[in-house]
Amino acid sequence: MIKWGISLAALLIAAPALAQDDEIVVTASGIEQPRDEVGQAITVIDADTIKTRQAIDVVDLLATTPGVRFNRTGSVGSATGVSLRGAETTQTLVLIDGVKVNDPSGIGDGYDFGPLLTGNIRRIEVLRGSNSVVYGSQAIGGVVNIMTGAPLEGFGANASAEYGYSDTVNAKADVSATSGIASGGVGAAYFRTDGISSAAGGTERDGYENIATNARLKLKFSDALSLDLRGYYIHADLDYDSFFGAPADSSDVSKLDQYVGYAGLNLALLDGKLTNRAAVTYLRNDRDYYFVRGTDPDYGYKGTNLRFEYEGVYAPVDAARFIVGYEHERPDYDFFGFGSADAARINIDSVYGLAILKPFAGLAITGGVRHDDHSQFGGATTFGTNANYTPNAGATNVRLSYGEGFKAPSLYQLYDTFSGNAALRPERSKSYDIGFDQSLDGGRATVSLTAFRRDTRDQINYDNATFTYGNIDRTRAKGVEASIALRPVDALTVTGSYSYIDARDRSAGSATFGNRLARRAVNQVSVSADYVWSFGLSTGATITMVGDSFDNAANTRRLDGYALAGIRASLPIGEHLEVYGRIDNLFDEDYATAFGYSTYGRSAYGGVRVRF
């Protein structure tokens, strides 16, 4: 505790929060809002941060933000889960360009971050705390909102290519333009690596290939009417080590094809006081698994989710906005393998309403309610409210938040032939926040501090007594998140975060009552610094320290804490060309985020960027 206290003190003196000065966020209520109108804790990772950090994995960016813990089972592309504020990884809702992408064919409807590389991603918003009023099921821990780039005015194009450790190739390109009523863009990214052995102590490398493409088109027929079309596609091909028993070298292969689509019509009425959005979204995840490459798949899953959304926003006066919405979705699940096949589908209808009120200057209050009707277990109603008060036009913000969350049982948990339980109830949570943000010296320093608590009941887990899934768990997480952004001179930016998370099993009568939840370290601190020299060279470093955790619910298998350091540099050559490079895990730290699985040692990469 003394060590972590010193680390926190150093952070509060010298470090920061990512993109704290961004004025507009969209994840809190689903519409654009000024940051000082939102009472919930949100971190923004903007395009400049993504470019500067040179990260390949989205998870490596998320890991430097407050309240985030993750685990990865080996090489790049391997199964990766993200936990927000100590919640289960299946309780993180994920959006890509406005489309809910949690996998209906997963055991717990979770999202696997392994195949999600930074590619042409331009912005990430992380909302921490239960928020099912806006997003429905899964948003118990919070929401990770992934966005690709918006089209530029006129014409623009970017491309980059890099090479590094383990014969890794990473290339991406995008182009966008605006002409008349149309604006749009397309992008593509390619990644391949020989990887590392995913199994700790293994000798054969597990390679990975990833192809991602994205596209946007907006047709603005008038100031009042427009059409949005968006698409995202990932193909991933991964060699992985067997997880039946202890991880060990094997010839196993998994292949993923993920399709994400959005088509939305926007209509403004009453001189813009009433805006309407009607959209159809589509997700499809095809996952095939092979014991030996080159053979037919031995088993596989297909999950699809077709959604219809309507959202209306009425703003009769500047001080009030009212949001109403209706959603219908139909998740489908299919499985084949081991001599059997399963299929299931359900229907969910949802209605919600939100009010955003500003009774006087500096105070914004948001409150809402949502009801979801599930064709299997019936209805679930959730409430949420938050407030933000600033007495000085945003320099100081005091935040309060209460949010309820629920998570519907997954189709696997409901209908699996061997372990399904059609009588499952939804998981429910209550989340409380209090925090403040302070801007100093004209915005050159910002300080943020949040305290939180979340109680979850009816959490679904495998019941060893009945060999089926049941609502058998209760959990509690509480803690503190701190961050500071510092820019003492224009050339120097320092960013960082600290979070303390005490996440425990509160299932009365359980053998694990009072134990820490698996793979959730109590302490984590991250500090980044970047300096731009007078001749254009940019240099930077990131240090992340993660405390001890346990790999299992019994708390008998410890994962030792670790400290990672990385350095980076980039240098523009003329107006359109830039060279860059980095060294990850500079001191070759030996660590694990999941027991029995390897992580990368010291590795170096270099590349070039071109911009037009």
Image (cartoon, rainbow, N blue to C red):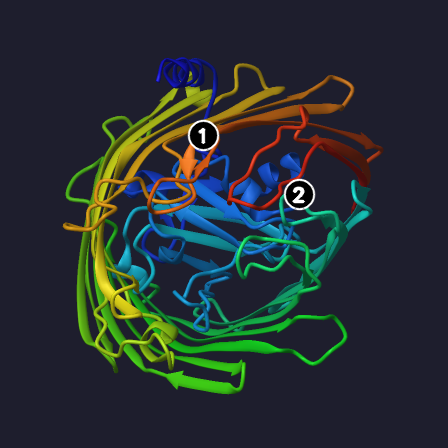
Mark positioned earlier in the residue sequence (2 or 1): 1
Tag 1: Cα neighbours inside 10 Å, few (<14), some, or many (≥20)?
A: many
Position of 319 compared to 605: left or right?
left
Residue at 57% x, 48% y: name it: 58
Position of 386 compared to 492: left or right?
left
Q: Nearer the viewer, mark 2 or mark 1?
A: 2
- Residue sitting nearer the eye, 611 or 292: 292
Q: Position of residue 512 (x, y in %)?
A: 25, 46
Position of 440 compared to 260: left or right?
left
Q: Position of residue 285 (x, y in %)?
A: 54, 73
Position of 238 compared to 353: left or right?
right
Q: CA distance from mark 2 to mark 1?
A: 37 Å
Total labels drawn:
2
Residue type at numbered disc 1: Ala
- Residue sitting nearer the eye, 406 or 572: 406
Q: Are marks 2 and 1 in contact (CB under 8 Å)?
A: no
Which residue is the site of mark 1?
A: 17
Mark 2 residue element: loop
- The part of the image, by quadrant, that contains residue 22 is top left
- Residue sitting nearer the eye, 298 or 57: 298
Residue type at numbered disc 2: Gly
Mark 1 residue element: loop
Q: Position of residue 554 (x, y in %)?
A: 33, 45
Which residue is the site of mark 2?
A: 201
Residue at 72% x, 71% y: name it: 292
Residue 17 seen = yes
- Residue sitting nearer the eye, 160 or 249: 249
Tag 2: Cα neighbours inside 10 Å, few (<14), some, or many (≥20)?
A: few
Q: Position of residue 305 (x, y in %)?
A: 44, 76
Residue at 45% x, 49% y: name it: 82
In the rendered view, tell whether residue 450 sits above or below residue 240.
Answer: above
Q: Quadrant of the N terminus?
A: top left
